[in-house]
C-alpha cells in the first residue's frame, strides 16, 4: 500500500495590535512655572516651562475631551495653536493632545502627523518622547506602514529600560505582514523568551505566530515543539490535527497515528477527511481492524458519505484483517455504486473465498459485463473455478478457454481444462460402472 502523509495546513490567526493612546501628560504646577531638567541616558536635557495660560487652555481641552466633546476640545486647542511664541514643550503638548483627539475619531493619518510633530520638537521630556515613539510605532502598524513601524519600535527598544515582550511581537507581526518570515522569527523568539524570563503568560497568539514562522522556514521539529506547547496551554482540536500533520512531514508515522488517535478519543474528529486520514494511518501501521472500526463509526455518525470509495476502503480494512465475511457488505454497497466492474470482481473473489459459489458467479459475471477490469483473464479463471464447484462443467470450460487466450493465464487455464476433462471422464466411467452393476 502506498504511504500517504495527511497534512493539515498550518494556519495563522490574525493577531490584533491594540494601539494604546493615552491622554497628554498631566502637568504639575511646578512644570507650569519653571524649566524641567532631566538626567537620563547619560545626558542632561532641559525642558522649557509650560506657561500658565497655555496650561489652562490645555486643561480646559482635557475636560471637554473627558466629556467626549472632541470638536469643542479641538477648538480649544486651536486657540493654543494661535498663541504667539509657543515654546517646544508647549507645542509638543498641543500636538500630543491633537493626536489623541484625532485618534479617538479614528483619523489615524492626522493622529500620526501630530505625533510626528511631537517628536520634531527639541528638548521635550524623555518620557514624552519615548511614549510618543512607542505610540507612533503602533499607529504606523495600524496604518499598514510596517517598515516605519519597525523602525520606530526598534528605536524605542534601543533606549528602553527592560522592555517586555510586546514590542518584539509587534516587530514580528510587521515583518509577517510584509511577508518576510525569516526576519519575523527572531523578534518573536526574543519576545517570547523575555516573557518566559519574566514569568509571564505566553499568549496563544504569540505561539501561533512562532509556529507559523518555524513552519514557513521549514523548521519542522521546532514547529512540533510549539504545537505541543499550544496543546498543553490551549488545547484545541486543530492543534492535535496539525501536530499529526507535522509528524507526517517528519515521516514519524507512529507519532502521527498517536496524535490522531488522541484527537479521536477526545472527540475532535468531525469531518470526513479526518476519519479517512485516521483509517488510512491505521492501515499503514498494520492495524486494519482499528481502521475498520473508525470507518464503521464514521458511517454510523453520518460523517462518511456513502460512496463507492469509502465502502471500498472499509472492505479493504476488513480484507486486510482477514475477515472476508465482514468485507462482503461494504463490497456489495461499493459495487452497487460503481460503474466499473473491479469492485464486483472483488466481491466475487470474497464470495469464492467463503465457498458461496452461486453468489461468486453472479458477481464475477456482473463485473465482466460492466468492464473496466485490469486482468479480465484472471476473472475468467475465478469464474471457471466457481462454475466447476457448482458442477457446471461446460460453462466452466468456456470460461477457462477464454482465459487460455491470454498468455498470463494460459498455463493455469490449460491445467484446469485438463482437470475438468479428466473429472468428466471419471464421472462418466463411474456412471457406466454403476449401470453395469445394475
Image (cartoon, rainbow, N blue to C red):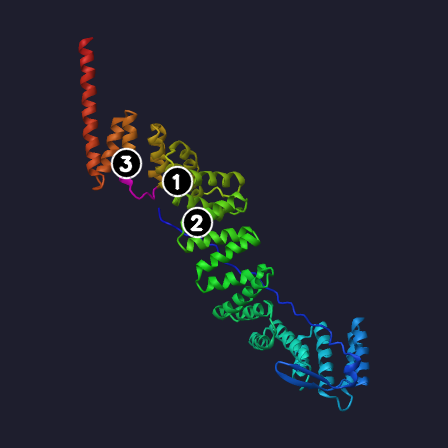
Q: Name the residue carrying label 1.
A: 316
324, 280: nearer the viewer = 280
**Where does label 2 land, which residue?**
255
Along the line of sight, which residue is nearer the eye, 90 or 280? 90
Q: Which residue is drawn at 73% across and 88% down?
A: 87
Q: Does the magenta stretch include residue 286?
A: no
What residue is shown at x 52% (from left), y 38% (from top)?
300
Label whose residue precedes the other's in the sequence (2 or 1)? 2
At mark 1, the secondary structure is: helix
Which dot, 3 or 1, sits closer to the camera? Answer: 1
Magenta residues, start to end: 371-381
Residue position marked by numbered label 3 in the rendering: 380
The CA span between labels 2 and 1 is 24 Å
Q: Residues within 10 Å of mark 3 (few under 14, many from 20)?
A: many
Q: Quadrant of residue 233?
A: bottom right
Q: Which of marks 2 and 3 is nearer the N terminus?
A: 2
The front one of 284 and 333 is: 284
Amino acid at each position: 500500500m502506498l504511504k500517504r502523509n495527511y497534512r493539515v495546513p498550518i494556519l495563522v490567526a490574525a493577531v490584533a495590535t491594540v494601539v494604546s493612546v493615552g491622554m497628554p501628560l498631566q502637568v504639575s504646577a511646578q512644570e507650569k512655572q519653571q524649566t524641567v531638567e532631566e538626567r537620563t541616558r547619560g545626558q542632561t536635557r532641559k525642558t522649557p516651562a509650560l506657561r500658565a495660560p497655555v496650561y489652562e487652555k490645555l486643561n480646559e481641552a482635557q475636560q471637554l475631551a473627558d466629556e467626549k466633546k472632541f470638536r469643542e476640545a479641538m477648538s480649544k486647542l486651536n486657540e493654543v495653536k494661535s498663541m504667539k511664541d509657543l515654546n517646544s514643550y508647549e507645542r509638543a503638548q498641543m500636538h500630543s493632545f491633537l493626536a489623541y483627539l484625532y485618534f479617538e475619531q479614528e483619523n489615524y493619518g492626522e493622529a500620526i502627523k501630530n505625533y510626528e510633530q511631537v517628536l520634531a520638537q527639541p528638548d521635550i521630556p524623555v518620557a514624552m518622547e519615548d511614549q510618543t515613539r512607542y505610540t507612533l510605532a503602533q499607529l504606523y502598524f495600524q496604518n499598514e506602514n510596517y517598515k516605519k513601524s519597525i523602525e520606530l519600535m526598534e528605536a524605542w527598544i534601543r533606549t528602553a529600560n527592560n522592555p517586555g515582550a510586546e514590542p518584539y511581537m509587534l516587530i514580528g507581526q510587521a515583518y509577517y505582514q510584509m511577508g518576510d518570515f525569516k526576519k519575523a522569527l527572531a523578534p518573536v523568539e526574543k519576545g517570547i523568551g523575555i516573557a518566559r524570563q519574566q514569568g509571564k503568560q505566553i499568549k496563544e497568539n504569540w505561539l501561533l505566530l512562532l509556529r507559523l514562522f518555524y513552519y514557513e522556514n521549514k523548521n519542522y521539529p521546532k514547529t512540533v515543539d510549539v504545537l505541543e506547547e499550544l496543546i498543553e496551554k490551549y488545547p484545541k482540536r486543530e492543534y492535535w490535527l496539525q501536530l499529526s500533520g507535522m509528524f507526517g512531514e517528519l515521516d514519524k508515522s507512529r507519532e502521527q497515528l498517536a496524535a490522531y488517535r488522541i484527537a479521536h478519543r477526545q472527540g475532535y474528529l468531525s469531518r470526513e477527511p479526518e476519519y479517512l486520514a485516521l483509517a488510512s494511518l491505521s492501515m499503514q501501521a498494520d492495524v486494519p481492524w482499528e481502521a475498520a472500526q473508525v470507518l464503521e463509526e464514521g458511517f454510523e455518525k453520518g460523517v462518511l458519505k456513502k460512496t463507492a470509495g469509502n465502502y471500498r476502503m472499509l472492505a479493504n480494512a476488513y480484507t486486510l484483517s482477514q475477515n472476508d465475511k465482514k468485507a462482503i457488505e461494504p463490497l456489495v454497497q461499493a459495487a452497487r455504486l460503481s460503474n466499473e466492474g473491479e469492485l464486483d470482481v472483488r466481491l466475487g473473489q470474497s464470495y469464492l473465498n467463503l465457498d458461496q459459489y452461486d453468489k461468486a458467479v453472479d458477481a464475477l459475471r456482473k463485473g465482466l459485463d460492466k468492464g473496466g477490469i485490469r486482468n479480465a483473464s484472471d476473472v475468467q479463471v475465478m469464474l471457471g473455478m466457481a462454475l466447476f464447484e457448482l458442477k457446471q462443467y461446460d460453462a466452466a470450460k468456456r470460461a477457462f478457454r477464454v482465459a487460455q487466450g491470454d498468455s498470463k493465464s494460459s498455463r493455469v487455464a490449460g491445467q484446469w481444462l485438463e482437470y475438468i476433462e479428466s473429472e468428466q471422464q471419471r464421472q462418466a466411467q463411474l456412471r457406466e460402472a454403476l449401470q453395469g452393476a445394475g
